[in-house]
Image (spheres, rainbow, N blue to C red):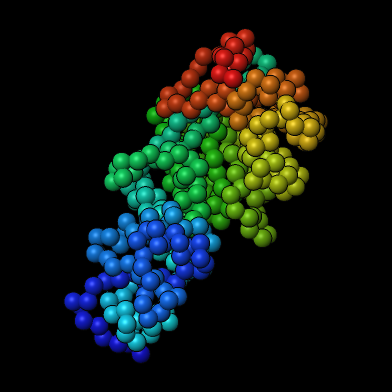
């Protein structure tokens, strides 16, 4: 049943909080009790407030609170039967707060405002730069704000747009690499499900690479598992085709997001990256030492080099070097920049600089 409500009635956001904690947070945001229905709280609105108030709620209320609280927007008087009838169709608060929180991401996708920084990857034996990882960044002109790669991934996951983001990021990244005019190797992040669910991925990627004047041998695809692999996943066959065309394959975030079984056993990557969470503090943590040692030994027995990422302190760098890790990457070695850093590392200078920061 629909009950007509006069348009002169003020617009109100009505919420049923899931807990006393959520109730307290919303009260601090200006919500007040609905006199006739104590389980509900409300906030009078002007039309221009809608977007901003949902953004505020998305930041103030916990994810669980957003998922379990319900809301409706109404013009019905607070003491009317119509309000209760409308609230029967109330939706989880998260259905509107999640898109509001990541409205910037939708603008970035629509305007394609992605760009890339490049972080050097060093050979531990020589200190020379052997490749660069391409790290996505974005600028939201409306909010005059910048976003890093993790924020972009989080936005894509929250809005279920990982595949669309991956496609845009790859296209933009390859164009950015071509504009550098460099023959170096570049590590490019990919989500496995995104490439495996796109039957034209390989064809379109190879076509773009050739069109831009790049060589497949310059591109090392990093597989990052930010979502569970699809059942009956065709990834091993696709990886084999990618490698046959000359592209490289690196397994990213090993011991982090990525489990070892379906990457390290099902196919043979060209490079294995040890996740920064495992690398950080590895020089002081016995269990981390055992895991990293076993990984390096197993990889080397198969002829696969190992790259440690997230290196920031002298002790961790030295531990990885002594262990035989092949390549290193991290803020302690070089930070990402919009240009290609080519200077080799001189370890005495690196250790002196990092020791001065402690």
Residue 319 locus on image (x, y percent):
73, 22
* The residue positioned farthest toward the front in the image shown: 35
Closer to the camera in the image, 124 or 282 = 282
- Name the residue at 37% across, 81% down: 36
Left or right for 97, reference 344 = left
Left or right for 101, reference 300 = left
Q: Is residue 98 above or below residue 43?
A: above
Q: Is residue 141 above or below residue 307?
A: below
| Location of the N terminus (image quadrant) | bottom left
Q: Is residue 136 above or below residue 126?
A: below
- Name the residue at 22% across, 76% down: 9
* The residue positioned farthest toward the bottom in the image shown: 1
Residue 267 locus on image (x, y percent):
72, 43
Q: Is residue 291 above or below residue 103?
A: above
Left or right for 298, reference 33 = right
The number of numbered badges drawn on the structure is: 0
Closer to the camera in the image, 223 or 325 = 325
Report if residue 13 is visible in the image: yes
Closer to the camera in the image, 249 or 20 = 20
Report if residue 129 is visible in the image: no
Q: Which of the 4 quarters of the picture holds residue 121?
A: top right
Residue 28 locus on image (x, y percent):
39, 58
Residue 244 locus on image (x, y percent):
63, 39
| Location of the C terminus (image quadrant) | top right
- Name the residue at 60% across, 25% down: 312
Left or right for 333, reference 112 = right
* The residue positioned farthest toward the left in the image shown: 8
- Name the residue at 51% across, 58% down: 63
């Amino acid at each position: 049943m629909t009950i007509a409500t006069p348009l002169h009635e003020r617009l109100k956001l009505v919420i049923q909080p899931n807990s006393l904690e959520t109730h307290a947070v919303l009260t601090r945001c200006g919500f007040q009790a609905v006199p006739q229905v104590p389980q509900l709280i409300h906030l009078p609105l002007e039309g221009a407030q809608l977007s901003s108030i949902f953004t505020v709620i998305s930041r103030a209320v916990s994810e669980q609170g957003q998922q379990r609280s319900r809301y409706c927007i109404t013009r019905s008087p607070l003491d009317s039967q119509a309000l209760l009838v409308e609230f029967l169709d109330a939706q989880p608060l998260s259905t509107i707060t999640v898109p509001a929180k990541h409205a910037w991401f939708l603008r970035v996708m629509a305007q394609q405002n992605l760009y890339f920084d490049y972080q050097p990857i060093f050979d531990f034996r020589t200190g020379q730069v052997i490749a660069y990882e391409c790290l996505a960044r974005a600028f939201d002109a409306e909010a005059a704000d910048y976003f890093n790669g993790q924020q972009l991934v989080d936005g894509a996951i929250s809005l279920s747009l990982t595949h669309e983001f991956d496609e845009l990021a790859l296209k933009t990244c390859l164009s950015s690499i071509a504009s550098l005019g460099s023959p170096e190797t570049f590590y490019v992040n990919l989500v496995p499900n995104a490439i495996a669910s796109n039957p034209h991925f390989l064809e379109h990627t190879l076509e773009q690479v050739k069109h831009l004047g790049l060589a497949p041998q310059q591109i090392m695809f990093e597989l990052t598992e930010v979502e569970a692999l699809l059942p009956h996943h065709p990834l091993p066959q696709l990886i084999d085709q990618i490698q046959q065309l000359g592209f490289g394959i690196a397994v990213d975030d090993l011991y982090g997001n990525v489990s070892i079984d379906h990457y390290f056993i099902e196919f043979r990557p060209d490079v294995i990256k040890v996740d920064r969470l495992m690398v950080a503090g590895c020089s002081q943590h016995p269990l981390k030492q055992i895991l990293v040692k076993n990984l390096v030994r197993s990889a080397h027995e198969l002829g696969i080099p190992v790259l440690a990422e997230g290196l920031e302190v002298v002790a961790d760098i030295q531990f990885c070097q002594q262990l035989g890790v092949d390549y290193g990457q991290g803020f302690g070695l070089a930070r990402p920049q919009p240009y290609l850093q080519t200077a080799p590392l001189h370890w005495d200078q690196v250790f002196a600089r990092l020791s001065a920061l402690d």
